[in-house]
Image: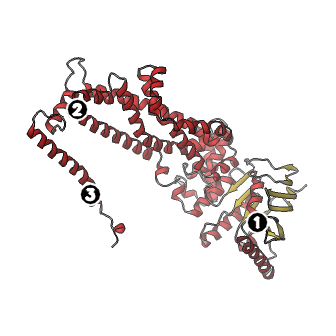
Amino acid sequence: MSFITVKNLWKEYGQQVVLENLNLKVARGEFCTLVGASGCGKSTFLKMLLGQERPTRGDLNLVGQPFPAEPDRNRGIVFQRYSVFPHLTVRQNVLMGLELEQKPLLGKLFGVRRREAMQQVDEMLASVGLAHAGEKWPHELSGGMQQRLAIAQSFIMKPRVLLLDEPFGALDPGIRGDMHELILSLWRETGTTIFMVTHDLNEGFYLGTRLLVFDKVRHDPQQPEAFGATITYDLPIGQTDRQLYESIESSVSQTARALSV
Amino acid sequence: MRLINRHPGAMAAFVLGLIPFALLIMVYAMASQERLAENPNDKLLPGIEQMTAAIDRMAFQEDRRSGDYLMWVDTLASLERLGLGVGVAALLALLVGILNGVLPIVRASLAPLVSAASMVPPLAILPILFIVFGLGELSKVMLIVIGTAPIMMRDVAQRVRELPQEQFIKIQTLGANSWQMVIRMVLPQILPRLIDAVRLSLGPAWLFLIAAEAIASTEGLGYRIFLVRRYLAMDVILPYVIWITLLAIVIDQCLRFTNRRLFPWYNAGGH
């Protein structure tokens, strides 16, 4: 049985078909990047993996069981923005998950157990390069640092699946490279299954083990909502063929243009 | 340079701010002097001496009949009502606002009622309060509560819903249940916003306080002003109005200061 199975999955909002007939099998520990034009359902698919949205038809299974219908501690998420809590310092932000897990009523740890948890927090912060910033507020951090914090916050829960929704989209190119290295090293260490949505095809070709291209195969100019997107390319990474890159690029941008009319 | 691009310096801004006050005082002093020159017993525009004499009589001499220092008794009574009313209203606003903001089921059943209640003119139901709660303290406090709570409830609910959706999702992925979400994420982020809401509702709260005191009371700042109106005692009314204004400013600034001290992340743009 594979780790994640998607079978004949459809997502529709009323008349509008977003995803049509998605089929996919993902093994434990894979790092999938999802690329495609805006409006091609990559984020919708990620939301279904998260439990924020439900499929209209078809199966979405985690180890044979349907995905829970609401977000839970087994699936971590990092959004492009607003992923960290502004009213908590960096250390408190990372500590939060551990506190919620151990204290269902107060949601807060005290004394020895807090110190023990803090040790775990500090190790986590060191591994994302935030050891020096533990007592800072999130608004005092740069965009890249805030994303490091959001990643640490998710990884400390040891989620089975980590979902990244354009996590580096708002960052400077140089910083983006550092973040790629960080996420790859954390992925190798923990063996977490990762799905990452990105706009940047290059990022998709470079990161992870597998590239999933979401695109519309059929397009009706009179009725753009009639057909949904599906996975048009499912490639193992390493096959970074220039020609293939260009052909994906051109088909994705063609869809993007068609959708933006 | 265009007018909209000309900014006064710090010193200039301070002086510019003072000018209207100085002008107001000057115009009053001149008018008062003129009237007093004509008739030394004029009551409408008392001079500084009459007013300081009135303050001295009200605040620093025992009242001949009751033996109280009236201005302090009035101030204490009014502040007690105001504090109690606004405090209860803020607590209610926090409770109902958070429930409305966080739980869709509660919102569906409670939000329309809160919206309707916030449209009721509070002074129109003052007679009802007097009938139901009597002429004692309770009806005055209730007027402030009823006058300010519904709007604060709506404000708090709105602020809760303005918290980024990403945070609600994020805390669920950290395993939070609904209760933990409220006490670890919503409540701490709403408290500074509640203090802002209280600051804004202090204006209406004073209005309701003085209205209630004017109608049925035996002490209080509003009671005194309306009492001495019968004798045209502008020398008491004007200092009382200035005193109320000062109290309002001090309370507002205390709340602002508290907000800054307790929630450094909020005021540094961390939200």
**Residue type beneath disc 2:** Val
Task: Determine which quarter of the picture holds residue A8.
Answer: bottom right
> Which residue matches tag 2?
B236
Which x, y percent locates residue A235? 83, 71
Q: Nearer the viewer, residue B9 or A146?
A: B9
| Mark number displayed over residue A40 | 1
Q: Nearer the viewer, residue A181 or B58?
A: B58
Q: Earlier in the sequence, mark 2 or mark 3?
A: 3
Which chain does the numbered disc 3 sit on? B
| Mark number displayed over residue A120 | none
Q: Secondary structure at mark 3?
A: helix
Q: Residue at x 65, y 65 (%)?
A: A168
Please indicate, yes or no, whether residue A112 appears anywhere in the rendered image. Answer: no
**Residue type beneath disc 1:** Cys
| Mark number displayed over residue B16 | 3
Which of discs 2 and 3 lies nearer the camera? The answer is 2
Which x, y percent locates residue B217? 35, 23
On screen, A182 above or below B255? Answer: below
Which chain does the numbered disc 1 sit on? A
Residue density around tag 1, few if under 14, some if 14–19, many if 20 or more, within 10 Å: many
Q: CA distance from mark 3 to mark 1?
A: 58 Å
**Residue type beneath disc 3:** Leu
Q: From the viewer's perspective, tell me whether residue B127 is left or right of residue A125.
A: left
